[in-house]
Amino acid sequence: MEMVFNTNAAINNYLCWAVRLLKGPVSTITYTIENNAEINKEVMQGKNLNSKEIYRHFFETVRKNKESGDNLGEEILAVCLHILANIPGEADEKFYVITDDKGAAGKIDNLFKRTRMQYRGKEIGIYSTPKLVQVLFRKGILTEKDHIREIMSAGISGNLVVLGIRKRDIRVKEISSDAEELADMLMQPDGIDIIF
């Protein structure tokens, strides 16, 4: 970060704004801020921004409050993405999140949608594995059906469920199929457009 921004205050200010904009009413980050006066002072009030320790202190403290089943992973990812999205001189959609967790993708997407347009920074893409495979196929990087099928079925047992639209569909819907059938649809010109 020090190579991108010229002062600790500038670096820390991006963390402060990311947390302020993305924290939700019920979240581990909000809980940490409300129950730790030092984190509240540093991150919410922007005190001591010249310190080199704010990032380390913030992330260490938040991780200590992690509980099973919470959304801390998505929250931290959203904060980090917000910081990356605001690095000067970077193009839209230079950064992508690859996840097959529809819930996590939705939460990250909602966090950014709740942020006012002028504070969002650059566009960050969110892809599922099948969507990534479709993009790579359309760019001519993946061309063999066996490779497409293997990548899409890695770590999955049973059918793949994607959000997509086929030629005769009116709207986006969940489409369930095995990797073989999805690879066939993906390779046809009008077979399927995978949204997620």
Image (tube, helix red, strand yellow):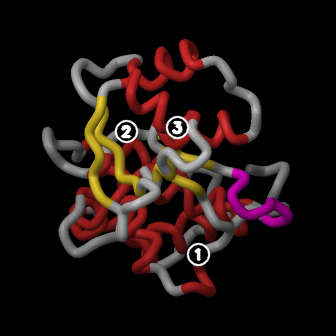
Q: Which residue is mark 1?
A: 120
Q: Secondary structure at mark 1?
A: loop
Numbered badge on residue 186: 3
Look at the magenta stretch and give its main secondary structure. Answer: loop
Q: Amino acid at mark 1?
A: Arg
The answer to which of marks 2 and 3 sits earlier in the sequence is 2
* Disc 2/disc 3 C-alpha distance (Å): 17 Å
Q: Residue at x 26, y 39 (%)?
A: 176
The image position of residue 122, as x and y in percent, is 68, 68
Q: Identify the residue at image location x=43%, y=47%.
A: 59
C-alpha span from label 1 to label 3 = 32 Å
Residue 133 lies, with reference to residue 167, above or below; the image says above
Q: Which residue is rendered at x = 58% and y = 34% of the image?
A: 187
Crowding around mark 1 (Cα neighbors within 10 Å: few <14, some 14 to 19, many 20+) is some
* Residue 182 image position (x, y, % from top left): 41, 32
Q: Is residue 148 left or right of residue 173?
A: right
Do callouts 1 and 3 mark residues in contact (Cβ within 8 Å)? no
Q: Which residue is mark 2?
A: 100
Dot 2 or dot 1, earlier in sequence: 2
Q: Nearer the viewer, mark 2 or mark 3?
A: 3
- Give the magenta part as a residue range: 88-94
Q: Amino acid at mark 2?
A: Asp
Q: Position of residue 15 (x, y in %)?
A: 55, 63
Which of label 2 and label 1 is nearer to you?
A: 2
Q: Is residue 80 left or right of residue 52?
A: left
Q: Amino acid at mark 3?
A: Leu
Is there a contact, CB below 8 Å, between mark 2 and mark 3?
Answer: no
Nearer to the camera, 184 or 159: 184
